[in-house]
Structures are given as C-alpha cells and as structure tokens.
Amino acid sequence: MGDSVICYHANGKVSTITFPDDGFERYSHTVIYDLYGNEVYQGGQGYRHGGGSLYLTYYKNGAVSSARSTFQPDGGIQYFDVTTFFNEDGTFLRKEDNSWDRQLTIPTYIEHNRVVEKPTDKAKDSVNYFIKNISGKKMTLLLTKPKEPEYKKLVVIRNNKVFDAGKFEKYNPNIKISDIYRIDILPLKKNYRTVLINSTELNSNGREFYLIVHTE
C-alpha cells in the first residue's frame, strides 16, 4: 500500500495498518484488527473537508487499548469526539461519545399546543445499489460518506462478484451512488485505472448496478 505503516500483535498478526488517502494528500486511514485477525475499527486523520485526528493507545501485547477520533468540519460549529475502547485481545469493549453536533435545531409545526406533521406530496422512492466487479482483478474498495465523517468501510470484491451497497431513499430522480458514497480503489499506487459506471443493462425497478471496469 505504498507508504503504509503496519503494527503487529505479539502473536505476529497485524494490529493496525495506516495508509494514505488517494484523493486527499493530507489525509490517511487506519484499520484496527483484534488478535484473531478480525477487523474491529476504521478511522481517519488529517485534513479532508475539515480537520480530524486519531489517537491510539496500545496494550503491551500490541493490541489497541483505545482509539480516540476527533473531527471538525470546515465552516461548522460541530465537533465530533468519540473514543472506542478495546479488550486486551483487541475485541470491542465500549464507546464514549463526547461530540457536540447540535448546529441546527429543526422546528416542528405546532398549532394549539399539538404537533402537526408537515404533509408530503408523495412517498419517496427507494433504490438498492449494487457494485459488480468486472475489472478482471480482485478489488478492494474504501467506502466513506461525506455527510458521515465517522463512516468508513473496506470492501473486497472478487472478479465477477456483486456487492450490495444498501438501500436508500431516492430524493430526486438524478441521485446516484456517488451522492451517497465516496469510493476509492485500493491499493492507492497502481499502474492501471479503474472506473465505476452505471449499468443500464442490469438496472431494474428499484435496483441500480454499477460496474468496476478496468482500463489500461
């Protein structure tokens, strides 16, 4: 993974791996594993649409004891501060959330001391997104959500396999998967190019497919 930094448990298995972001020069991602090789946490640090940090503490056996993630978006008064604690075998223990994210208070419609729901013109449609890998190679994707800084997910898709990216409300007919996820292809340094394209052939009512295509 290029400039990746790897730390190990005393048993020789990977404890943490940190690697740079492909699109943001001053941002990196960290993945934490327990003693058994299971992924238990993902976090980021540096600058990407705001400043973020990730502070890790370790047990003597190499397992992560705690991971404190902080983030403040550009132009916002929110402040995210979440600390995750782990057992000595690296498994999840508990989480403490000290964030302050009450930037906006959404008013309710009140009439004569009773709450009145605002009517909607029609029910929103929903769509299920799928990603199919037809690149000819096994691909590792890093999925993040611009509106949810804490969300980070690594997905491995073998050639000709399909990943279910989830079901979402379609607020307007032009919404696409890139409006929900930022998708990075790993490893970050490569001598080939991949693109994600909408598949009109596979799409059906309520289901949209995107293809990972390999180009030289």
Image: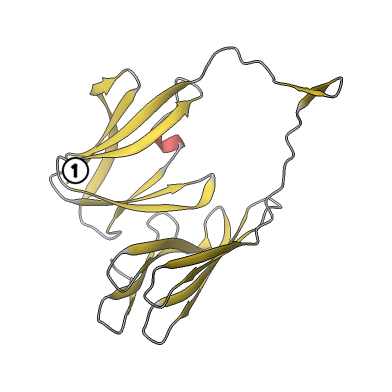
Vertical order, 204 against 32 (above or below): above
Taking 102 as reference, is 149 left or right? left
Residue annotated with mark 1: 215
Give the image quarter of residue 205. Answer: top left
Answer few, some or many: residues within 10 Å of disc 1's Cα (few below 14, many 20 plus, some between 14 and 19). few
Q: Residue furthest right?
A: 112
Give the image quarter of residue 88. Answer: bottom left
Q: Position of residue 169 (x, y in %)?
A: 47, 27
Q: Position of residue 85 (x, y in %)?
A: 50, 70
Q: Position of residue 195 (x, y in %)?
A: 27, 41
Q: Residue furthest bottom?
A: 60
Label 1: element kind: strand
Q: Quadrant of the N terminus?
A: bottom left
Label 1 sits on what residue type? Thr
Colour setting: secondary structure
Residue depicted at x 26% and y 82%: 11
Residue depicted at x 76% and y 31%: 107
Q: Position of residue 86 (x, y in %)?
A: 45, 71
Taking 203 as reference, is 95 left or right? right
